[in-house]
Image: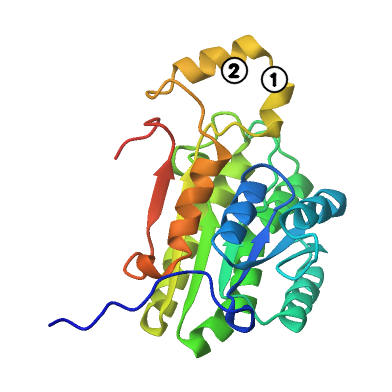
Amino acid sequence: MAAPRPSTDPIRPTAERRVALVTGAARGIGAAIATELHRLGLRVALLDRDDTGARALAKALDPDGDSAMAVRTDVGDPEETENAVRAVSSAWHSPDVLVNNAARTAPGSVWDVELDEWDALMATNLRSVLVLTRLCAPPMRERGWGRVVNLASLAGQQGGLVAGPHYAAAKAGVLVLTKIFAQELAPHGVTVNAVAPAAVRTPVMDELPAEALRRAADRIPVGRFGRPDEVAALVGHLAGDDSGYITGATLDVNGGSFMR
């Protein structure tokens, strides 16, 4: 008779509960991811420049503050980021799951983007992935288990159709950095994957005309925008025990907008 399969129930006794760190967690996809990971039984640290939004969500997830905490952080600032990881590790323990979601978008032509704006988007969208993974992955490696999920974008695969070239270039860099870290960490039980959403209905879209949104949705093969919870469900799977044979992958969540 085969040996019984180890339990993959993500809910553990409080002292053993895994810790997830989610950046850009105050709203949109980041908030949905934080909510999903908390639902799965993880303690969740919500990092965001929007301290008010992050604190409100943390309180909604856990009024007692035992399993959800907000840390005001600009991930474009390496020192501030390191302090945030230290705060989370001191309160609980170093993260078992890292979700690099924080990003800035900006329109513009490749001919017109100011260099300061280029550097600022790269710092938030790409350099932060390097900084946070180098902070969080070594303890995962030592424990022999860990999950890193990087939020990329369709723009990083096809070029920016709406967002500017600096956003697209940063997200393309995220895809490559995902593979590099995946190669480094695979022998140690740590997986690193990218999720590439496109046309997901987030608060940013509320500022756009309804007719423009309808026309955009009609061009998507499934006929609608994605939902943040659909992205979060995939991230939740990648953060679990059953995803240990998936690493270095880019998983698309785009309604068929880009098929390969």
Measured as percent of width and height from the top left, residue 172 is found at: 50, 50
Label 1: state its secondary structure.
loop
Work out which residue is located at the far left of the displayed protein and give it. Answer: 1
Label 2: state its secondary structure.
helix
Q: Residues within 10 Å of mark 2 (few under 14, many from 20)?
A: some
Q: Which numbered disc, 1 or 2, marks the residue that appears first in the sequence? A: 1
**Closest to the observer, 89 or 183:** 89
Q: Residues within 10 Å of mark 1 (few under 14, many from 20)?
A: few
Q: Amino acid at mark 1?
A: Leu
Query: Which numbered marker is on residue 208?
Result: 1
CA distance for labels 1 and 2:
7 Å
Q: Is residue 245 left or right of residue 96?
A: left
Measured as percent of width and height from the top left, residue 30 is found at: 64, 50
Specify whether residue 156 is in view: no
Query: Which numbered marker is on residue 127?
Result: none
> If the image is split into quadrants, where does the C terminus sit?
top left
Measured as percent of width and height from the top left, residue 143 is found at: 50, 88
> If the image is split into quadrants, where does the N terminus sit?
bottom left
168 up-or-down from 96: above or below? above
Query: Which numbered marker is on residue 213?
Result: 2
Q: Residue at x 65, y 80 (%)?
A: 94
